[in-house]
Image (tube, rainbow, N blue to C red):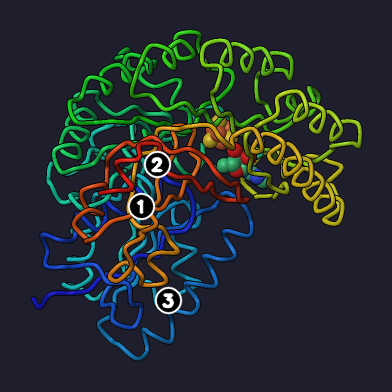
Amino acid sequence: MKSRKVYIQTIGCQMNVYDSGKMMESLVPVNCSPTDSLGEADIIIVNTCAIREKAVQKVHSFIGRLNSLKTKKENLRIIVAGCVAQQEGRALMNRFPHIDVVLGTHTVHRLPDMLEEVDHNGEPVIDIGMSESPVEFDAPKSQLQAQSDTNRFVTIMRGCDNYCTYCVVPYVRGRETSRRPGDILNEIQILTQSGIKEITLLGQNVNSYGIKEGWLTFPELLEMANRVVGLKRIRFVTSHPKDLSDDLIASFQRLDKLCNHIHLPVQSGSNRILEMMNRKYTRERYIEKVEKLRESAPDISITTDIIVGFPGERHEDFDMTLRLMETVRFDNLFVFEYSDSAITPSSRFPDKILQKSKNERLQEVLRLQKHISTEKDRLLVGQVFPILVEGPSKKELKSGALVNSSQKELTGRSSGNRIVNFSLKTDCMLDIDAMKGEIIDIRIDRVFSNSLQGSPVEKDFLKR
Ligand code: 5AD
Ligand code: SF4
């Protein structure tokens, strides 16, 4: 069969980004290659997110628009994967008859077989089966991920057993299952050998890694990754506050490659709402964990998620969230308006909050966080941070200045996960490539809302 071009539209979290990579990887041996152009594609994969109503609407409207492409190109294959596929299954196919394949969150590895089935029979195929076995989400043992990038995601577990009352994940991603330590190590080693310097370990609740299976604990897994030669940095997402152990807190001090950042979703500052959310911790317990983290790693960057307008959230409850933000002083946060989904228990809770109030609360959280971030950011000016260089900055790429100018702007990340741009005097492109994946000391000169601007500390860099 002639070679085919694959366009992947990924909506949602890092887990989907990882799965999209795996899908692409699995199609390469059957004569497929990636494309950035929707019009050029022979296969379109929509990897979907069901976490909030807006994301689901976005998915439906994207799939709807593909119909016109399908009418123009008879052999075009349309594949829908991810959480909406898992949640809606056959109904999705009935609503959009131009879909050829629907595959669920546990059947990503079946994509090449399903595609072959459609090619052979000309009939649409669906598989949204769920399994408890970790085997199905092992990565293909190949070097295909090798690219010039510096960072990659590595999934270490899937699913969630926590059943927060507002969340679809336990229903669409299934039971919490950890991946075998040996397979994780193998993937990290393959990535490192192909030039990756930083990995982000992914799971809905990484803190409970391996507990059910009786394998390594999460801190032990981190220790294993820390020993991989050539790897420079390790990150992870996401942690549930109730499972944040003292051992994990101590890892920030113990492991030299572990980055100084934790994403610790609090969701609300009100004990009444936390209880209704089934979060299994109180605001006091959350604050205690934050204090312990800062004792272990004084400069640790702490970010969070907040939901505003949960059913029954009174002004006093919302106020407790604002007060908690003032106490903790997060480095950054994501805030979401509560969104109903028919499959979650909270959709049946009384006292739904008006859209207008949800939006006002969201704006208020953003305002307060902006104020806190501005105050914290001011203190960064003049400080020196080791930055892992990722490549030319966005500005540099856009302006195309890379080829001509003797002054290049590069971009990288601090251990606390801040984007840092800095200029470097250099004569040729080769220098830029050589810098990728290096960690260099940068002094912060200016602060912008989404990035920091700095300059290399070593004068030698300027002369290079
Ligand atoms: N409504 C609004 N936000 C939600 N999140 C999860 N489910 C919902 C929902 N139903 C948010 C939580 C979670 C983040 C990934 O998405 O804050 O941490
Ligand atoms: Fe959803 Fe709660 Fe599980 Fe996070 S811990 S994925 S919010 S159920």
Q: Which residue is mark 2?
A: 456
Q: Look at the image and tell me whether residue 167 can be seen.
A: no
- Taking the spot 12% from the left edge, 75% from the top edge, the residue there is 3
Nearer-the-camera pick, 21 or 252: 252
Q: Which residue is mark 3?
A: 97
Q: Which three-letter amino acid code belongs to the residue tagged 3?
A: Pro
Nearer-the-camera pick, 18 or 418: 418
Q: Are marks 1 and 3 in contact (CB under 8 Å)?
A: no
Q: Are marks 2 and 1 in contact (CB under 8 Å)?
A: yes
Q: Which three-letter amino acid code belongs to the residue tagged 2?
A: Pro
Q: Is mark 3 within 8 Å of ligand 1?
A: no
Q: Which residue is mark 1?
A: 424
Query: Where residue 330 sits in the image (x, y, percent)?
Result: 66, 31
> SS for tag 3?
loop
Dot 1 or dot 3, earlier in sequence: 3
Q: Which three-letter amino acid code belongs to the residue tagged 1?
A: Leu
- Taking the spot 82% from the left edge, 56% from the top edge, the residue there is 355
| Location of ligand 1 given as a quarter of the image | top right
Up-down: is 253 above or below 168? above
- Taking the spot 58% from the left edge, 16% from the top edge, the residue there is 294
- Quadrant that contains the N terminus: bottom left
Nearer-the-camera pick, 253 or 3: 253
Q: Residues within 10 Å of mark 1 (few under 14, many from 20)?
A: some
